[in-house]
Every structure is written in structure tokens, then in C-alpha cells.
Image (cartoon, helix red, strand yellow):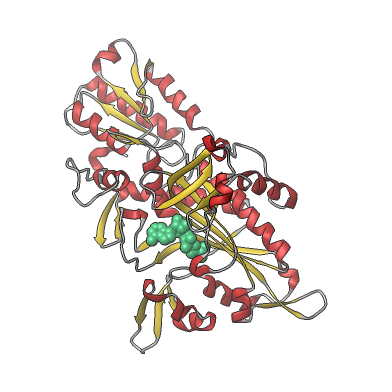
Amino acid sequence: MRLSRYFLPVLRENPAEAQIVSHRLMLRAGMIKQAASGIYSWLPLGFKVLRKLENIVHEEQMRAGHIPMLMPTLQSADLWRESGRYDDYGEEMLRITDRHGRDMLYGPTNEELITDIFRAHVGSYKDLPLTLYHIQWKFRDEVRPRFGVMRGREFFMKDGYNFDLTKKDALHAYNRHLVSYLRTYERMGLQAIPMRADSGPIGGDDTHEFLVLADTGESEVFYDSKVTDLSFGDREIDYDDVAQCQGVLDEFTSLYARTDETHDEALFNAIPEERRRTARGIEVGQIFYFGTKYSDAMGANVQGPDGKPVPVHMGSHGIGVSRLVGAIIEASHDDKGIIWPEGVTPFHAGIINVKQGDSEADAACEAIYKSLQALGLDPLYDDRDERAGGKFASMDLIGLPWRITVGPRGLKNGVVELTSRRTGESEDLPPKQAVEKLAQIYAGHLVKGI
Ligand code: 5CA
């Protein structure tokens, strides 16, 4: 993309309404604009990141054997009356009446709708196990929407639902989700720690939240510092291997790590004192096993091996995709702006022409721009006729992990400058080598974008 033709409305001033750094930087970098309280338009730069996160989530869910689909945002109230949650959900639910006087709602989650689909089409235990998911906008009429996309009213969420014949099978589905979530967050450059949590209005006893540690997080968390040494890495996983998935769950959930809702002072105090940590975290996902709560209420049975109807065991599993954009920024920024991890960056590299209009500099930028594109990379070329200082400041603000700076002085020596946004370190390289280096850096990090 050439910046002269793009839409990147960066703000010079800090917006007064933003209390935390990710909200401030998302507004300043021209990623979002508030449409109404807790409801945002995703401007082109923000939309690119959101799509990348969505695609990483799709790739990892499909890798785990889960099946993508799409359910609508608006739902009929009748299904929620069947489960009993129409009254229970309270004021967080946005209720709508259509022109025929029918009660509708903007879905805050989809247990009822998916259970309805399941009961209409699945009749036999032979069709199990089954895990369906979608990534769709949700609405919760939060009392205090705040921190930009972190606690929105409309937000983008992946929600997946498993249907299994037995509790044992459903717990394997739970474990599969935990494993796939660990991979997903690491690909986004995040450490998200599974912590034992409370199930709230979704129900059930088994639940873990995934928390990214950050001072601005809304949850208070308690953990053994040894959990932060764990990393998923590039281990090979066979998602059908029950023992292997259980092994990963055990490894990542045996050390003490809980949110304040389930915190147990006695257990916490049993950790050696130097390893006890109290901190704040951002909840970027949650997994639940709730047994037959919805299948009992809504009659979602299958015919079991002995011919008798059995209610299916279910769980639901969420990832806060739009919240993650903010969480990544909270975890990765400096005083100049955002620092995108390679896996999620909106553009792979910025090209800065320090002397626009100089025919040699223009030609060198053009050549670099085209060769990066030919390699499947997505560069942002700042070809505006502006002062170099302003170009550097905008590029630092929007946080592309790599920058190639092209100017007449370097070109005289046959070099351009390749700079890492994270370390600030620069290297002078012939243009061809700078391009090759970027191709190497991104090998294995190429996620489909928009
Ligand atoms: N049905 C279950 C699992 S699919 C469910 O709704 N779980 S949840 O309530 O925990 O939501 C899943 C994730 O969505 C949360 O972990 C959080 O990351 C994100 N989320 C929840 N509320 C908001 C909100 N108001 N703004 C942004 N993200 C949110």
C-alpha cells in the first residue's frame, strides 16, 4: 500500500477520553473510531489487524479439528426462554422487538442457537464427537464500557461448542481447546496463562480463563511465578491423542494460577513466598465444560449405542478477538507507539523515502516495494511529500516491526537502512539483501490478511 493513497487518520494529540495506553494508541494510530459508547468502527489499519487475528484463530481451530460456520447476530427470544436464560441474563442483554411484535435479541453468546441446530440435525451417537464454532459480533450492554475495544458493548468473539456422548469425551474436547488456545495466543506474540475461574452466566464447574498479565487488566489474579516460565513453543500436537492433550493441560494448569473469584488463600500461601504473585490480567479467552445443562433444558439428545436417548455433554469456548487487539498493544508498545509482533502486524514493513521526488530514492523505493510484494509480503510505502521526521514519527506510532529507510546518502554507497522497531537497531544493507532478510524473518509468520 502506498500511504499517499491509503486512509490512515493518525492523531497528533492524545485523545482525552482514553485512559489506557492501548485505547490511546488505537485512536492515535487511526485504527478505530467510536461510533457510540462501546461500539467502534474499525478503520483500515485496525481492520487489517482484526482480520489477521481472526485468521490465526481459524487456522488453529481447524488444526484442532473444529468446524467453522456462521450464525447470525440476531436471535429469537424463544430459544432463550427454553434454556431459562432469557430472564436470567438481565440488563446485559440487548432486547429488540421486530415489526410483528416478536421478541428478538442481539446475541451475547450462542449456546441456545447452536443447541437448536444440533438437535435439529444430529440424531445418533455415531455423529459425535462434533465441535462447531464461529467468529461473529456479539453484544453485551455493559454498564461501564471502557478502555476502547477492551470492554466494548459490541465485540468480536470466537465461540466454539463441543457435543460429546460422555463426560470423558467432553473433557477431551475441553483439553483440545486449551491446547489450541495456547498455540493461538503464542502465535499472536502473547503469553496468556490459563487460570481457574468462575463460570458466571454460562454455567458449569470446569472453567479456565486465559489471562495476559498487564497492569491495566480488569481482573485481579494470583499465581505461582513459575507459570510464567511455561511456553508452548513449536511442539507437535495430535489433537486426537487424549493422553497428549491431557498432558499439556496438566503441565499448564498444575501450578497455582487463579482469578480473584476462585482464589484460595490457604493454597496460595502454600507456594514458597518468593514465588507468590498478585497482579492484574486481561481476560482474552475462557473455556467451559457444563455437561448437560443446555441439552437437558432444550432436549438435545442422541440415540446412544443401546438405542436409548442420551443428552449430549457440552462445553463452550470463547476467544475475545477484538479485545486481543488491545491486549497485544498493552503487552507490546513503548513511548513512541505500538510495536506489533510479526505474526499480527498490519503491514510487514514500512518503507520510508526520506527525499520524495529525488529520482534515485523514488526508484529505489519503488523497486523495494515491488520486490517485497512479489515475495508475498505486504509493505506500507510512505511516499508522501513530507518531512522525514514526521514520516518516522507516524511509522513508529503505527508500530510496524521493520522499517526500510531509503535516502540519497545511503544510495550513494549502495545501501538502505533496515531498522527493528522493537530494538531500534539498524543495519545498512544493499536493497536486495534487506528484502531477502525480511523474507527470511517472515517465513513461517505469513498469515492471510486483507
Ligand atoms: N459462551 C462462552 C464461551 S464461547 C462465553 O461467552 N464466554 S465469555 O463470556 O468468557 O466471553 C469470551 C471472551 O470474550 C472473553 O474471554 C473476553 O475475552 C471476550 N469478551 C467478553 N466480554 C467482552 C466485552 N464486553 N468486550 C470485549 N471482549 C469481551
Horizontal and vertical percent position of residue 165:
72, 69
Horizontal and vertical percent position of residue 217:
39, 49
Residue 66 in view: yes
Q: Quadrant of ligand 1?
A: bottom left
| Left or right for 97, reference 449 | left
| Residue 389 drawn above or below residue 41 | above
Disc tally is 0
Horizontal and vertical percent position of residue 80:
49, 79
- On-image quarter of the N terminus: top left
- The residue at the point 34 percent across, 19 percent down is 417
| Residue 34 drawn above or below residue 229 | below
- The residue at the point 16 percent across, 28 percent down is 387
Horizontal and vertical percent position of residue 394:
24, 35
- The residue at the point 54 percent across, 80 percent down is 83
| Residue 234 drawn above or below residue 87 | above
- The residue at the point 34 percent across, 15 percent down is 415
